[in-house]
Amino acid sequence: RLIWSTQFENFLATKWATAKRFGLEGGETLIPGMKEMFDRSADLGVENIVIGMPHRGRLNVLGNVVRKPLSQIFSEFAGGTRPVEGEDGLYTGTGDVKYHLGTSYDRPTRGGKRIHLSLVANPSHLEAVDPVVIGKTRAKQFYSNDDDRTKNMGILIHGDGSFAGQGVVYETLHLSALPNYTTGGTIHIVVNNQVAFTTDPRAGRSSQYCTDVAKAVNVPIFHVNGDDLEAVVRVCELAAEWRQNFHSDVVVDLICYRRFGHNEIDEPSFTQPKMYQVIKNHPSSLKLYEQKLLETGEVTKEDVQRIHDKVNRILNEEFAKSKDYVPNKRDWLSAYWTGFKSPEQISRVRNTG
C-alpha cells in the first residue's frame, strides 16, 4: 500500500512534471493508514463512509483509496474532464480541475466485506466541505434508519493551517454532539506537513499543536510520526475503534512534511530555506520502511523490487488506456441516484421571445 502511494506520485511527477497536482510526497503513509481505517471500520459494522478533503493528496486518495480508474485520472491530466457521451449539456458541474473532483465506489475489504465510499467534491475554499460531509452522513443515517449511527460514518481530512485557522472547523466540531446534528462521531485526519502554503506554524496559530482547537469538545487526539508506517496504521485502527465504541469525534494528527512546494511549480526554499535543506536530505517513508524490513530479514530486495515492478507495470498500462479513455458513467448519478433527472431533462429552456 505504501509502494502504491509513493509510486503513484512519482509516476505523475515523471509524466506531467509541470502540472499542478498538489502531491502527497512527505505524507504518503496517509494512504495505508486510511485503507486500514476503512478495513477496521467495515469489520466493526460500518457500511458507508463519506469523505471530505482538500486538494493535498486528493488524486492519490481518489486513485488508491476510492479506486477511481487510474486511466480516468490520467486522461484528466491530458485533456480535462469530459461529459458522458450523448449527455453534453444535460449535467453540469463536471468541468472543475482534477484535484477538486470526487467519486463513489463500493470497495471490497480485506475482511471479505464491501463498504461504500463517497468522496465529496471540494472547491478551493479549504474546509468548505466539512458541514457538507456531516450533513450527507446524517442524511444517510436518517434514510437508512441507522438510529445508533454505526453503519454510516464521516471522515474529514484537513491541513494543519486550515484546521487551526478556519472558523468552519470549530463550528463543525461544536455541532458534533448536538442531538439534531450529531452523526455519532467523525474521524478527523490532519495531514500536518508543518507549513501552510508559506506560513510557518508560529505565524499561523497561538497554540502548540494545530489540533488544540479540538480540545474544546474534549475529544481524543492522537499525534503520530508520519514516517513510522506501523504507528500510523495502528493509530488509524484505534481511531476507527474509538468512533464505533464511544460515538464521538476523534482526531489523528499525522505529523509529516511537504517535500515540494505548495504546488509542484513553486520553489519552497525561497520562504523556508532551512526547512527545505533538511527535507532535501531526508529519505522518504517508503525508503525508511524498506530499510527496516530488509534489516530484520522480513523481505528480500527481490521481493521489494517485484512489487515495484508490478505497480509500475499497472501504472503504465493505465497510462496507455488513458489516451483512449471515454467516460461511460456519471460519477455522481450512479447506484442510489439512478434515474435522477437534470433540470434540462425536466424542462428544456425555451425561447420566450
Image (cartoon, rainbow, N blue to C red):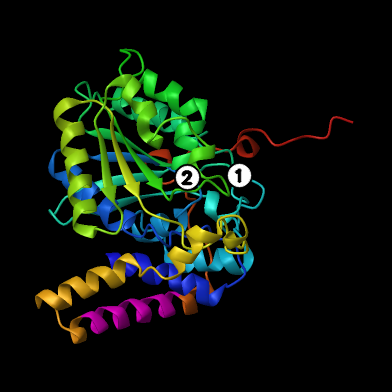
For image coordinates 51% across by 30% down, the residue present is 166
Specify the farthest residue to the right.
353
Q: Is residue 207 left or right of residue 285?
A: right
What element does badge 1 sit on? loop
Q: Distance between the residues labelled 1 and 2?
A: 10 Å
For image coordinates 54% across by 76% down, the residue present is 15
Check whether the beta carbons of the residues at disc 1 and disc 2 lie within 8 A of each other.
yes
Q: How dense is the environment of label 1, judged by Cα within 10 Å: few (below 14), some, or many (20 and up)?
A: few
Secondary structure that dominates the magenta span: helix
Spot occupied by residue 51 in the image (x, y as percentages of width and height): 38, 41
Residue tagged 2: 332
* Residue kind at label 1, given as amino acid type: Gly
- Between 76 and 268, the residue placed more toward the observer is 268
For image coordinates 74% across by 35% down, the residue present is 349
Specify the farthest residue to the left.
297
Above/below status of 304 relative to 33: below
Q: Could you say which disc has been placed on residue 93 in the image?
A: 1
Specify the farthest residue to the top.
179
For image coordinates 60% across by 53% down, the residue present is 97
Above/below status of 235 relative to 307: above
Would residue 120 be visible to someone looking at this image? no
- Which badge, 1 or 2, is on the more N-terminal residue? 1
Quadrant the C terminus occupies: top right
Spot occupied by residue 20 in the image (x, y as percentages of width and height): 59, 61
- Between 294 and 157, the residue placed more toward the observer is 294
